[in-house]
Image: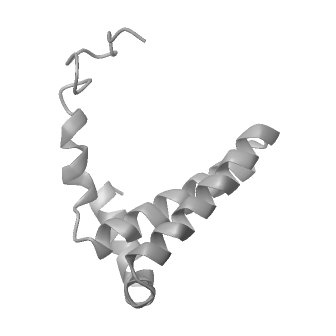
Amino acid sequence: MDLNKYQGLIAEIYLKKDSKRGVHKTFNWLIEEIGELSRAVRKGNKEKIQEEFADCLAWLLSVASILDIDAEESMDKYRKGCPKCHATPCECKE
């Protein structure tokens, strides 16, 4: 499934509820999920990392939908490589 289809699926499941909650509170849920992902990464549990990654992506796609942002279109920024040096892999100085 491509990113637009996932965004549509998450919107179908959650957009009504998340829109009612509002963008700021929905964004706060995303940040909370990122914290959970961080804890999973620190513990090194791949199954939990994958689960939390999916949750983070779902919340991010929901925020995008509330803001009327096409997530796949947003990723065009990276189609030609690094947005700064335009190389793949990135050759920017650290």
Compared to residue 79, the image places residue 15 above or below, namely below
Q: Residue at x 22, y 71 (%)?
A: 68
Compared to residue 4, the image places residue 11 above or below, namely below
Provide residue 27's location: percent of width, then percent of height. 46, 68
Provide residue 62's location: percent of width, then percent of height. 40, 71
Q: Find residue 92 and report its image quarter.
A: top left
Answer yes or no: is residue 44 visible.
no
Q: Quadrant of the C terminus?
A: top left
Identify which residue, 75 or 19, lies in the foreground: 19
Provide residue 49's location: percent of width, then percent of height. 68, 48
- Across the whole image, how many numbered discs are drawn on residues? 0
Answer yes or no: is residue 36 visible.
yes
The residue lying furthest to the front in this view is 24
Q: Residue at x 74, y 47 (%)?
A: 40
Quick check: 75 left or right of 29?
Answer: left
Quick check: 18 left or right of 84?
Answer: right
Q: Residue at x 25, y 45 (%)?
A: 75
